[in-house]
Image: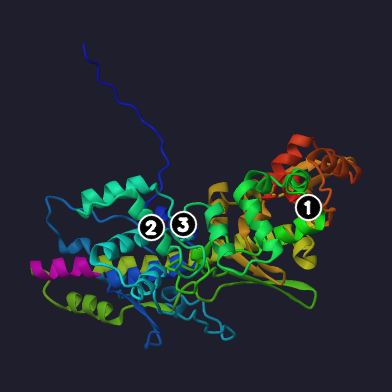
Amino acid sequence: MLKQQLNQKLLQKLSPQQIQLMKLIQLPTLAFEQKIKEELESNPALEEGKDDSDEIRADEEFESSEEQREDERIEAEDINVDDYLSDDDIPDYRLQANNYSADDEESKVPITGGKSFHEFLIEQLGTFPLEEQDRKIAEYLVGNIDDDGYIRRDLLAIVDDLAFTQNIFVEEEHLEKILKLIQSLEPAGVGARNLKECLLIQLREEEKSFHQRLAIEILEDHFDEFIKKHYTKLVQRLEVDQEDLRRAIDEITRLNPKPGNSTSNSSRDVQVVVPDYTLRIVEGELELSLNGRNAPELNVSREYREMLETYRQGQKENKAQKEAALFVKQKLDGAKWFIEAIKQRQQTLMLTMGAIMEYQKEYFLSGDETKLRPMILKDIADEIGMDISTVSRVASNKYVSTPYGTFLIKEFFSESMKNEAGEDVSTREIKKILEDSVAEEDKRKPLTDDKLAKLLKDKGYPIARRTVAKYREQLDIPVARLRKEL
């Protein structure tokens, strides 16, 4: 038999406004600017620029409760127009948000136009006397070239694609002939199917000195030994001395392994990093400011406020007026909330980054990465009295401009470990020492992971070889054998 029970539960739920605020906090400057544009387009009660009135009559408190409807009928009494038109004078700052400072410089990234990489190649094909079918095949091959300048697909697969999609039937040998034509285009090396072919194309275009011929022989017959830097084997098999081998390798290393990136007509998008904060040192003290482009000056539309006042003076029995007043009220609520959310976002961002700045003050004053303290999200959350998730959102995808460069904020967070003195040190500090040690090593005899571990131990950082290997990989430093130079 089914039993019915009545239970009471105490639940904590985020309101839609709080959820939206969390999303706003997570946005970096460029994405936040786009969000503001979208809000301005969707809410006519929100305006950009200064309000021309000295006093804005508005609600003293932000109303967060949802409108309740019953039987889809709207009663005039549910809309308290007087809340929006009270006699109390409300300061302008309550309904405006402005992040611009008088010292801010207006800077814009210039936008350039031009041919794409593939259009650049197609244009060159126009200089060759090709039959119509061969030209279509050549253009199809160009379309298969990636942004690095390579054709990474098997020619047999392209033969099948031409037959099924273009109704063009061609033998693989003829396709290879047209590919050789494409490989003669600029930039040198374009249309190669792998790195070896790309480098050989570039070398074969030049006049052949002894060392260039030796470089071609290395690529053709000893490519595996070359990429693995087995220089001793190369000296023995080529029967040359180390100086000749070094000069031949210099000929190879000056070549471009990604010819698609060598032209200004490349279709790659350029990612512009816009710092969300600026940190300066003024008279020996740190000064933090939020990017002035985080938000334009916003205010609540005077026209919409007047519309609501007109409703109050009109006949409340009119159903059309009631519906219009509800629409206006919702837009005014949205505009007021968005302006308030911008202010809360700014306060949260400044509070969090201010705590990070103080926590890492020694580093920001000196620029010495070994001065970075171990810091996790909980340290900052405890400092400012907010949740860890809020700190994570603030640090996510945001940058700070410092006297030493522009950095991702999350780079300042690191775990800790004990040194020989029993002190907590940042793993970032250890990585910096590791990076410097590799940079100063003798490239003819690079340090192995075991030697690096011993070196760090001598400096007071007792870490295992496998940990050194992990940190080395995180720093994109290859193994000792691949760092070897002649």
Residue hosting label 1: 240
Q: Tell whether position 326 is magenta.
A: yes
Q: Which residue is drawn at 29% across and 72% down?
A: 41
x, y (%) of residue 262? Answer: 53, 69
Residue at numbered disc 2: 177
Residue bounds of the magenta highlight: 319-328
From the viewer's perspective, is residue 214 above or below residue 188?
A: above
How far apart marks 2 and 1 lie (CA) works out to 36 Å
Q: What element carries label 1?
A: loop
* Mark 1 or 3, closer to the camera: 1
**Residue indicated by mark 3:** 150
First along the sequence among labels 2 and 1:
2
How much space separates mark 2 and mark 3, taking CA atoms?
A: 16 Å
Badge nearest the viewer, 2 or 3: 2
Disc 2 on helix, strand or loop? helix
Is residue 239 visible in the rendered image? The answer is: yes
> Does 454 sit above or below residue 130?
above
When the figure is inspected, residue 96 is found, relative to residue 434, above or below; the finding is: below
